[in-house]
Image: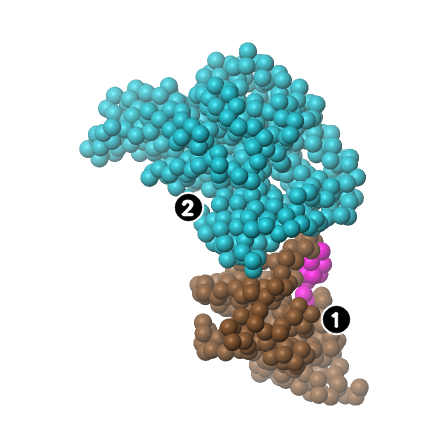
Chain colours: A cyan, B brown
Amino acid sequence: MNLELETAISPEKLRRVAIDPVSRVEGHGKVTILLDDDNKVHQVRLHIVEFRGFEKFIQGRPYWEVPVMVQRLCGICPVSHHLAASKALDMMMGVKQLTPTAEKVRRLMHYGQILQSHALHFFHLASPDLLFGFGSDVAARNVVGVIAAHPEIARKGVLLRKFGQEIIRMTAGKRVHGTGSVPGGVNKSLAPDDRAELIKDIYQMVAWSREAVGMIRNLFEQNLAEYNEFGRFRSAGMCLVRADGAMDLYHGGLRARDIDGNTLFDHFNYGRYWEVIEEDVKPWSYMKFPFFKSLGPDEGSYRVGPLTRVTQCDSIPTPLADKEREEFMAFDGGSVTGATLGYHWARMIEMLHAAESIKDLLHDDDISGHDLMATGQRQERGVGVIEAPRGTLIHHYRVDENDLVIRANLIVSTTHNNQAMNTAVREVAKKYLNGREITEGLLNHIEVAIRAFDPCLSCATHALGQMPLEVAIVGADGTVIDEATRDHRGLTHEIHNIP
Amino acid sequence: MNANNIFQLDGEDIPFRSGQTIMQAATHHGTYIPHLCWHPDFAAHGSCKLCTVKVNGRFGSSCTTEAQPGMNVENRTAELDDKRRTLLQMFFVEGNHFCPSCEKSGNCTLQATAYELKMMSPHFDMFYPDRPVDASHPDILLDFNRCIMCSLCVTASREVDGKNVFAMGGRGILGRRIHINSESGKLADTDFAATDRAASICPVGVILRKRKGFAVPIGERKYDLAPISAQVKEAAP
């Protein structure tokens, strides 16, 4: 990992550029860049400026309330928290095996979530950069611009997301923040009418997901050198895999590989995750920095999410997505597997996998079964791990004899990627900003690198396209040299040269 | 029923038996008067004031005012519903009512009444009172955060269960609360049982069966099926 630009030697002599907030990501964060008089970059940091207290205020609450309460962390992928908490409390209840209907309904809910979240990110948040160029006219570089220039692509993105949200509504009761998953199982199965409704459209969703994979592949083919090198760095990685090594986004053992691709641990029981992962803290960020214990805090950071999952699994258990995985791995001699923008390609392969999995589940009669709950021998603690859209998500609870939560630890996907995102923006800053006059287009390159990870910086709702942006370049003596502003509509950018 | 025993409720003829209150007669007839502390199985408490109506132009609690022939009663007027909305807002800010993660959501009288009266926000500053939960009982959780002091549990435990498990005590908005009648003050040290009438009487999310939360899916909960004003017959005496 690149730590060279984390802390400047003499920051007081440098001027500061801030991207605050970073836009077209979930939640709120900012990037600060310290430059000298020749615009040479000395320090780059991605700061997470929000503080969330869920681990604290869940304490003292009854455990069955947890899956419903903690999902309020997020408005984009609440199902991930809903399911990770449920899995942790399954373990606490001693449930080793859910009923077939319960597991399949939860999986359906999860794949619906993967589909809607990946579609949202690719079509709404990332496509403006990819379709128009990283430094293109900011007035058009947004989802409204995509709708105007590529209405068919935008329409498919909207409908893919809608389909995923409908699955969530039908399995959890609401599109956002439902109650379907409960400790030990689910409270409903898929109603026959809902099942028929989904079957009607699923083949179209699979087809559109395939098109989306083709679209990002084409973009790579057209911009191979730039895409491959953009924010590129070598990284370790971690994800869940199935017992046979195949991708499994709902359940499995932990697999980790180091920077050279050597296995650090494989099929590791996530119920003891603290034996392999530790969290570091830095004074300038509210987000922790997890690392592999065996490698230590300086060398042990890693990546999670679509790129890691697609490259570290042995196969994908649905045929179309697995074929795309093989092509992705072989493309240009495997070069894309290490590219930061490879996240987009891997994300679309996963969206295809989710669509295929949904199709299979809809044709399985267990999905509308009636045996919903399992029981077991009560334990003191429970750990639930799931592959959320953005990566490995860990929920860990201890519950007392009166059924109240006494301890909670959550390591969310974006936290795992903290160091990786910082490294990516440093690589981009070195290559694109060093020695150049700062413009909005150049600053957007930093955001493009962050967006590749699809971070959920607060795990909260976002204000898509409405985030005001202020960038100020302050000289070593404290005077403002340049200032860039964007209004609340997110449509205009102006650079003022202050005399 | 005496043919003369009729009063007017928002212009509608409501028949009543002698001795019935306005609330009892209206409920029997199927007409909804918003209320929280009144329950058809128990004597009126008259404390929440949500059922306040105008009887011949004067305010009165419909749960404690006896029906009389020829009365003109105003119920769902803009003026009265506005006052009820304000009362509801005060109920919400006095306690810790977090509907998004409350297992009573969809089955809660307070929430359903707030929807009925189109309460869109708490309006007032939240009190955030410190009300610890009592999880000592093996089958029942008491989450006092949501208590609206309706006293139904006190009455049910005393009159139906014959146990006197609950009592109202203390003074002032923050001091007044439900007490548990045991040496330790804990429910586990009483003879309270999950089969008691008091265990199922709470209109909000205070007295809860443990390990049963969220068992009923969204769409099938009581007030998902119909608004509270359309479920009056179920509460008829």
Position of A218 compared to A355: left or right? left
Question: Which residue is depicted at the point 56% across and 28% down?
Answer: A266
Location of mark 2 (residue): A51
For marks 1 and 2, give the CA distance.
48 Å
- Kindly identify which chain the residue marked by label 1 belongs to: B
Circle number at residue A247: none
Q: Residue furthest top?
A: A333
For the point 65% across and 70% down, the residue is B193
Q: Chain under label 2?
A: A
Q: Residues within 10 Å of mark 2 (few under 14, many from 20)?
A: few
Which residue does the numbered mark 1 point to in the structure image? Answer: B233
Determine if the magenta segment contains residue B221: yes
* Residue A280 versus residue A40 in the image, above or below: below
Span shown in magenta: B220-229
Q: Amino acid at mark 1?
A: Lys
Q: Position of residue A461 (x, y in %)?
A: 51, 44
Quadrant location of residue A427? Answer: top left
Q: Which of the two marks, 1 or 2, is nearer to us in this view?
A: 2
Q: Which residue is more in the foreground, A292 or A367?
A: A292
Helix, strand or loop at label 1? It is helix
